Amino acid sequence: MPSFGRTRELPDPPPCPPGWRTGPPDFIVVGAQKSGTTWWFRLIASHPGVHQPDDQRPELHFFDRFFGTWPTMDEIERYERFFPRPGGSLAGEKTPTYMSCHWAPEMIRQAAPDARLIAILRDPVARYVSGRTHEERWLREILGDARDWTNETRWVEAAFAKGLYAQQLAWLRASIPADRLLVLQYERCVADPAGELARTYAFLGLPPHQLRTEQLSAPRNVTRVEKMGLEPQRRALLVRLYRPDVAELKSLMPDLDLALWPDFAE
């Protein structure tokens, strides 16, 4: 079994029942991290035209493992086996770090050329706080006293970079045709989940399907620890440093509603 660039291996692919098929995923939620991707994937999977194995975690982290090598045909064939579905059903995955890995979009294009990609963007400062809170909990639980400031510096650098959406969107557009890429705004999804989900279903070629209000509003992966605070100086710095990228993002995504990102409102 290949190492995939990490010590933790992928799980075994789920079984494919007789009469079903496997193959490249029909859709992939590619990011951004801490922007409601788990919640949105579950809403997509709630459509009767989508199949998601109950015992399979949707976050595969397949392409982000290949930071130093290119996936072989055998590895791509193994990836395809993670998506068994009955005839007429769609199957997909979500890995929110794909968007921030510059190599992932091109690998996705080659491995799943017909897949439709969904990106969800959140206020970059709010995303930074949520991402750092998540990482701080992980560092504390996993590393404990073995934490090293040089490694933590890399975590903070990465947390900032994940909010530079304009560059990441450019990476996606360089490899993925425009008609196969849907970019959503997290805050719009929260404000109008039914409307934005209808857009998502239509983008995936699924017929309309209405979910119950409690299904739409039930968030996933809720942070169960107090969110990390930001000193006023650090917050002001983040806003200043993100502002040029947000301006570039607005030029790439004219329907971006900056009123929903108050620090960057026009």
Image: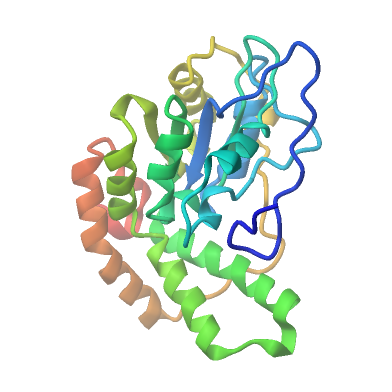
- Name the residue located 73 percent from the left edge and 75 percent from the top edge: 142
- Name the residue located 68 percent from the left edge and 72 percent from the top edge: 137
Q: Is residue 45 above or below residue 266?
A: above
Q: Is residue 181 left or right of residue 28?
A: left
Quick one: 105 or 70, which is closer to the camera?
Answer: 70
Residue 17 placement (x, y as % from top left): 80, 19
Mark count? 0
Q: Is residue 35 above or below residue 175?
A: below
Q: Is residue 150 above or below residue 181?
A: below
- Name the residue located 34 percent from the left edge and 35 percent from the top edge: 176
Residue 206 placement (x, y as % from top left): 53, 14
Quick one: 63 or 262, which is closer to the camera?
Answer: 63
Q: Is residue 170 left or right of residue 133?
A: left
Quick one: 194 or 139, which is closer to the camera?
Answer: 139
Q: Is residue 45 left or right of residue 197?
A: right
Could you tell me if residue 118 is visible in this image?
A: no
Q: Is residue 218 left or right of residue 155?
A: right
Residue 38 figure quarter: top right
Residue 118 placement (x, y as % from top left): 45, 35
Residue 28 placement (x, y as % from top left): 52, 35
Image color mode: rainbow
- Name the residue located 77 percent from the left edge and 33 percent from the top edge: 14
Could you tell me if residue 198 is visible in this image?
A: yes
